[in-house]
């Protein structure tokens, strides 16, 4: 078979396999949650009200339905960009108006991203002002939503354009090992963004005020000292500006960490529960989960770039995906975009592996918290958080295997009790 046709067929088969699997999973999730909607699971009969249980069921099903719309839109967009010739057309239009060169390459990537953003806009609006609003989670005003979008766009430009330029330049001028240099550049870039995020990027979107609760500060400092960490500061973030969902996290490198509490979390948990939640987060550090995740992500991106290095040299990669490569010039931007479009079709089928690993990390962090703080308080905090976020207690096991980065509440509480 000619390799270009083989590429087209591979795309078609993978796309159908992806769609069928995702539809099957969503169908299972909706059915499973609906079947258990009328009764709170026995283990939670005394802690969760039927009303809260049903709200979680309805919220879960509503999110699954948005997910189905999203996957349909994604599939259509992918076909439109590739086999229906969308990317080829965009490439021709930018070539005709700008000629060959770096300017055209960058314009191609930027306009592709903007069009993709526009296509996803209605669903994202519906997610925030439809679903989240209906279940009482949304605090975002339309004005804040627009300002977030514009700021996001600006940050994306300021941070994204230099690295895009560098990657395209390396692809062109880096010789046969360009993918290796590009990988090194991307690793450095990612560490740089992580480094500036807490002080430069996050304050653009949220206000961080020093934590005033002296008792809580003392408790948390004691916990951190016990666990071998020093805190560089405690902050409260105005998460309630956008959403009623709550969280707590650490930022910063090395032993000195900033601790950030969502104001929504402070409002819901008492001192014991707060300490237990932070002990869980410290468990992630003690077990080096973040480092392990980063190592995996760096290793897979190296493999991905090596693969891109090879396919970008094959004419069938372009023609099989509906694009006519520029035969005399470089096709870096086209190769990059096609690769990013097609890659998720492959990686979807290994996503249960990374989700499983992430759930294992959560169990380890829970175990750490139970040993180093109050296990009962952690259980209470988890129940409150699952309830406040309307997470279902009865998800479908297959859906969990593919999508859940955190184990369902029932499993976490059972492990902690044991
Ligand atoms: Zn965790």
Image: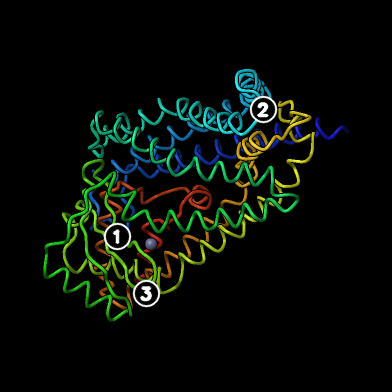
**Residue 227 horizontal side relative to residue 74, left or right:** left
Residue 195, quarter of picture:
bottom left
- The numbered mark at residue 368 is 3
- The numbered mark at residue 283 is none
Query: Closer to the camera, 168 or 344?
Result: 168
Residue located farthest toward the right when viewing the structure as drawn: 1
| Residue at x 72% of width, y 53% of height | 177
Query: Closer to the camera, 266 or 17?
Result: 266
Image position, residue 350 (x, y; %) = 61, 51
* Residue 256, placed above or below residue 143: below
**Residue 285 horizontal side relative to residue 188, left or right:** left
Count of labels shown? 3
| Residue at x 49% of width, y 66% of height | 291
Using a 10 Å C-alpha cutoff, classify the residue at mark 2 as few (fewer than 14 neighbours), some (14 to 19) or many (20 or more).
some
Which residue does the numbered mark 2 point to in the structure image?
100
- If the picture is divided into quarters, which one holds ligand 1? bottom left
Image position, residue 339 (x, y; %) = 65, 39
Query: Closer to the camera, 216 or 111?
Result: 111
Which residue does the numbered mark 1 point to in the structure image?
382
């Amino acid at each position: 078979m000619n390799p270009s046709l083989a590429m087209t067929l591979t795309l078609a088969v993978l796309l159908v396999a992806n769609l069928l699997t995702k539809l099957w999973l969503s169908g299972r999730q909706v059915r499973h949650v609906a079947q258990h909607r009328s009764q709170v699971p026995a283990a939670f009969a005394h802690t969760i009200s039927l009303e809260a249980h049903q709200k979680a069921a309805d919220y879960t099903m509503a999110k699954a339905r948005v997910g189905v719309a999203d996957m349909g839109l994604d599939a259509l967009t992918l076909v439109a960009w590739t086999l229906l010739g969308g990317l080829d057309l965009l490439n021709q239009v930018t070539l005709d108006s700008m000629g060959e060169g770096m300017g055209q390459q960058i314009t191609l990537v930027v306009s592709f991203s903007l069009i993709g953003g526009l296509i996803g806009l209605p669903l994202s609006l519906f997610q925030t002002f439809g679903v989240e609003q209906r279940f009482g989670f949304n605090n975002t005003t339309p004005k804040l939503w627009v300002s977030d979008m514009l700021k996001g766009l600006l940050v994306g430009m300021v941070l994204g354009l230099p690295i895009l330029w560098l990657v395209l330049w390396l692809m062109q001028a880096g010789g046969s090992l360009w993918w290796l240099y590009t990988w090194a550049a991307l690793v450095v870039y990612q560490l740089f963004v992580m480094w500036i995020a807490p002080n430069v990027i996050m304050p653009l979107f949220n206000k961080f005020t020093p934590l005033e609760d002296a008792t809580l500060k003392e408790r948390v400092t004691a916990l951190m000292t016990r666990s071998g960490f020093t805190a560089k500061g405690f902050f409260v973030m105005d998460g309630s500006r956008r959403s009623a969902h709550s969280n707590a996290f650490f930022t910063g490198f090395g032993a000195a960490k900033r601790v950030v509490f969502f104001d929504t979390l402070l409002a819901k948990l008492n001192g014991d529960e707060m300490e237990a939640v932070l002990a869980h987060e410290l468990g992630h550090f003690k077990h080096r989960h973040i480092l392990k995740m980063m190592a995996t992500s760096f290793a897979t991106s190296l493999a991905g770039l090596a693969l891109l290095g090879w396919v970008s040299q094959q004419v069938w990669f372009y023609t099989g995906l509906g694009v006519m490569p520029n035969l005399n010039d470089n096709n870096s931007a086209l190769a990059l975009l096609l690769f990013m479009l097609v890659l998720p079709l492959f990686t979807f089928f290994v996503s249960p592996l990374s989700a499983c690993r992430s759930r294992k990390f959560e169990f380890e962090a829970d175990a750490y918290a139970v040993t180093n703080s109050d296990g009962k308080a952690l259980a209470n905090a988890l129940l409150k958080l699952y309830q406040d976020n309307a997470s279902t207690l009865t998800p479908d096991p297959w859906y969990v295997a593919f999508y859940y980065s955190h184990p369902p509440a029932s499993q976490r509480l059972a492990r902690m009790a044991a």
